[in-house]
Amino acid sequence: MNLAYDSAQQPLEKLEKMLYAGIDCNYKYAFLNKLQQREQPKLFNGDDRNELHDNVKIKWRELIIALQKEGVISSDITVYWVFFLFDGMISTTITAIESGDVALNDVKRYAWKSFAQSIGIVLK
């Protein structure tokens, strides 16, 4: 996820690449995310920035906040809600891949389009 974040310049492209990285990690992402949720029930706390400057969740949160300030992502929904949609899209993609009913070449495009539109991003 950090590599995906660092591989792009534009905030929206960073978010898209982070979604793809989560999909590429597949079960590893899902397992580690569930494990982290059990160990740390809160998604973020106020001291995270000072303690974990390289934490991917911090980068992700700041990215979402910046995109909301720019009006790219709807500000009517919280960062937490966006995170749960992001996580859910990765889980949905894993399920779609397992089902064999969605062409592998289409999975990431479907995931990005679905996620982006669910948070108010207008795709061109």
Image: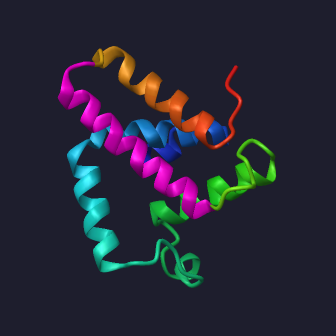
Count of numbered circles in the view: 0
- Report if residue 1 is visible in the image: no
Quadrant (top left, top right, bottom left, bottom right) of the C terminus: top right
Q: Nearer the viewer, residue 101 or 112?
A: 101
Residue 45, percent from left and from top: 54, 80
Magenta residue check for 97: yes
Residue reaching furthest to the bottom = 47
The quarter of the picture where residue 102 lies is: top left
- Report if residue 94 is visible in the image: yes
Q: Nearer the viewer, residue 92 or 71?
A: 92
Residue 16, percent from left and from top: 53, 36
Identify the residue shown where x is 24% and y is 28%: 97
Identify the residue shown where x is 48% and y is 66%: 54
Left or right, residue 41 beside residue 32:
right
The quarter of the picture where residue 60 lies is: bottom right
Q: Nearer the viewer, residue 46 or 90?
A: 90
Residue 115, percent from left and from top: 53, 38
Identify the residue shown where x is 52% and y is 46%: 6
Residue 25, percent from left and from top: 27, 43
Magenta residue check for 74: no
The quarter of the picture where residue 94 lies is: top left
Instruction: Label the magenta part by its dominant secondary structure.
Output: helix
Residue reaching furthest to the right = 70
Q: In this picture, is 46 found above or below 89?
A: below
Identify the residue shown where x is 64% and y is 38%: 12
Left or right, residue 81 beside residue 95:
right
Region in magenta: 79-101
Coloring basis for residues: rainbow
